[in-house]
Image (cartoon, grey):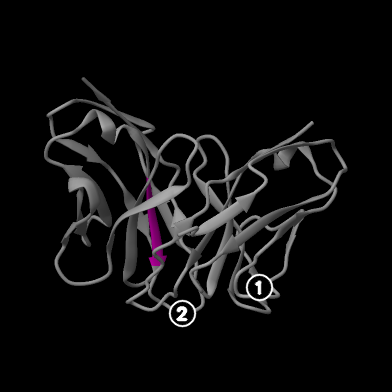
Amino acid sequence: AQSVAQPEDQVNVAEGNPLTVKCTYSVSGNPYLFWYVQYPNRGLQFLLKYITGDNLVKGSYGFEAEFNKSQTSFHLKKPSALVSDSALYFCAVRALTPGRRALTFGSGTRLQVQP
Amino acid sequence: NAGVTQTPKFRILKIGQSMTLQCAQDMNHNYMYWYRQDPGMGLKLIYYSVGAGITDKGEVPNGYNVSRSTTEDFPLRLELAAPSQTSVYFCASSAGTGISGANVLTFGAGSRLTVL
């Protein structure tokens, strides 16, 4: 079975400060890892993904994430937060093995950026 | 670019009623998915399809049915609605699950269903 844990329900950060949203995962074998963002009353939007290669992945809107295999983590980061980054963020995982073709999502972390 | 279109956006059902949530995509994606989102619970996979005529159960399929007669459409049927099915339902599609397409999902805007 594959699973994702997002240990923080909410993260609060001041505008201009760096932000981190945490994610740990569990899969058999090597993972595909994703971050999605959800704005109010909207569907989820893709931010970035890790498939293979460089452990630091850059995505949309200045976000990046670092894959750490030994800690089974894939934390989302941004050097300088904007008020417009306030949203619900989901981490997702899928094993590379065939058969399990759909993503498993975490429970989400609400990011609040204060002006 | 319509992407993934879901209808209706909102619906209130009485216990025991049935309804179909519609989902259509215009990106020629082979893979389509239905998720439900409950507060604080993330998204749970209900059903998915890897192509026309092929469907498979996800984590929480009980009380739902799907069909995939065309590449474009993937309707979700609720039979005998129950309060536990009150949720926001999201349809999504993707080009494939190989490395190049690797599960980058495009989501619809969601359908909010309340069962009273």
Could you tell me which residue is drawn at 24 percent across and 47 percent down?
A76
| Residue A61 or residue B81, whichever sits in front | A61
* Residue A25 place in picture, x, y as percent: 35, 55
Where residue A38 appears, as percent x and y from the top left, is 41, 42
Q: Quadrant of residue B111?
A: top right
Vertical placement of residue B112 versus B107, above or below = above
Pointer 2 chain: A
Task: Tell me which amino acid carries mark 1.
Answer: Thr
Marks 1 and 2 on same chain: no
Question: Which residue extends farthest front?
Answer: B1
> What range is drawn magenta here?
A90-94
Q: Is residue A93 magenta?
A: yes
Indicate whether B57 appears above or below B40: below
Q: Amino acid at mark 2?
A: Pro
Relative to B48, is A4 above or below? Answer: above
Q: Position of residue B77 (x, y in %)?
A: 76, 56
Comparing labels 1 and 2, the label whose residue is closer to the camera: 1
Position of the C terminus of chain A by quadrant: top left
- Residue at 43%, 48% (x, y): give it: A44
**A96 or B93, nearer to the observer:** B93
What is the quadrant of residue B12 in the picture?
Answer: top right
Q: Residue at x 51, y 77 (%)?
A: A99
- Residue at image mark 1: B55
Chain bearing mark 1: B
Residue furthest to the right in view is: B16
Residue A33 magenta-highlighted: no
- In the displayed structure image, the side of residue A6 where residue B14 appears, left or right: right
Residue at 12% across, 29% down: A16
* Left or right of B104 in this view: A112: left
Question: What secondary structure characterizes most of the magenta part?
Answer: strand
**Residue under label 2:** A98
Q: Secondary structure at mark 2?
A: loop
